[in-house]
Amino acid sequence: MQNNAIEILRLLQKNAAGSFQVAQSLPPGIYHDDEIHQLEQQRIFHRDWMCVGRLAELPQPGDYVTFNIADQPILVVRQKDDTVSAFANVCLHRCSRLLEGNGHVSKISCPYHSWTYDLTGQLVGAPFMQRTHDFDLKQHKLKTVSCEVWQGFVYVCLQENPPALGPRLSNLSRQIEDYRIADYVHVHQEEEVWGINWKCLAENFMDDYHLHRVHANSFNKYSSFEDVTEFFPGEDAYAFQYVQEDGGPHSVKAHVDNHWLSDDKRHRTYLINIFPTHLIQLQPDLLWYLSIMPDGIDRVRIRWSVSIPKEILETAEDRTAYIAEEIDFLKQVNGEDKMAVTRVHEATRSHEAQQGPLSWLERNVWDFGRYLARALCD
Ligand SMILES: [Fe+2]
């Protein structure tokens, strides 16, 4: 490892080992160093659980989604028994990628030579193979990838036999289980590619400090949240904060038919990072999540989706207009963030870029840095 990467890791570890009162931003080189990027691939993206979407986005058997984790093509498909499975998206014949994007299939058929697999990954068809010695369909099954569902979110992990995700999130589950988010109705999903290092966006999502400036015309149009946000360091697998509003005219609020949320939670917004790349904004009236995946050192693929509680959609005067308004708002927020994080990504290349002191509103930014230190510096 070159001196540059060694120094970045030293600074990362030093910052994580100190107290939050003296915490600083990440060393700027961490967004641009090739060796750090390679280390992240090995120690984060080949090891940790990655959210790939919600179960509700794959409602029917045969509904699938594809994506790459650290250059590994993966497919996730809903099974006939309603479970969900993940496989390497690689044909067992000549290694073609099998499925693209997302959609629905009754069988997984390779677009190169038509080898065909059922939804369990079992090879069930392979034309013109009858002269091949000892060829037996039953001997070929797609490589299974670990897959788990938590609160209606689907996660996969490239590690063989990884530690289960659920127990690592059990305390977070207790915080948010009253919201019943698995029942929120999926209404919208998008994918975007931004020209930044993935960490710029992961930090930004959990940064409460930029709201007053970057989101002055969106989140902060009617209120400011600095004095009503509670920060929690979380545990090894996550960190979170919540904004406790009061139910005023512009506050988030649970629907009158929602009888399962207690008083405070009816007006509370959770912001969660399940490390490293699952960013969640949970409200009693909205669920917005981003699943982000680096595509090289200076590109990030973002899959974001919006879900809304059933009781709100059922009583909306104009359901289509209600959904459109929520999506437009989140697109505005995304646009504001994109400009902000692009500035950070570009300027952290400067020879003059240095670590700066953090505000108390950046508690979870530091927690993310501590996660990186645990993952990269051991
Ligand atoms: Fe933001």
Image (cartoon, rainbow, N blue to C red):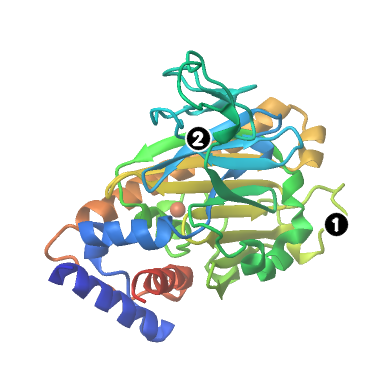
Q: Quadrant of the N terminus?
A: bottom left
Does the beta carbon of the residue at mark 1 sit less than 8 Å from ligand 1? no
Q: Which residue is mark 2?
A: 66
Residue 358 x/y as whole percent: 37, 74
On the image, numbered disc 1 is attached to which residue? 260
Q: Please, what secondary structure does the residue beneath circle 2 have?
A: strand
Q: Is residue 376 left or right of residue 313?
A: left
Residue type, numbered disc 1: Trp
Is 248 positioned to the left or the right of 354 in the image?
A: right
Question: Which quadrant of the figure has residue 55?
Answer: top right
Q: Residue furthest left?
A: 351
Q: Nearer the viewer, residue 148 or 93?
A: 93
The image quadrant where one finds the C terminus is bottom left
At a point 52% along the width and 19% down the height, the residue shown is: 126
**What kind of element bears circle 1?**
loop
Image spot of residue 267 (x, y percent): 72, 59
At label 2, counting other C-alpha atoms closer than 10 Å, the crowd grade (few under 14, some 14-19, many 20 or more) is: many
Q: Is residue 277 left or right of residue 166?
A: left
Q: Examine the rendering and report whether any part of residue 14 can be seen.
A: yes
Total marks in image = 2
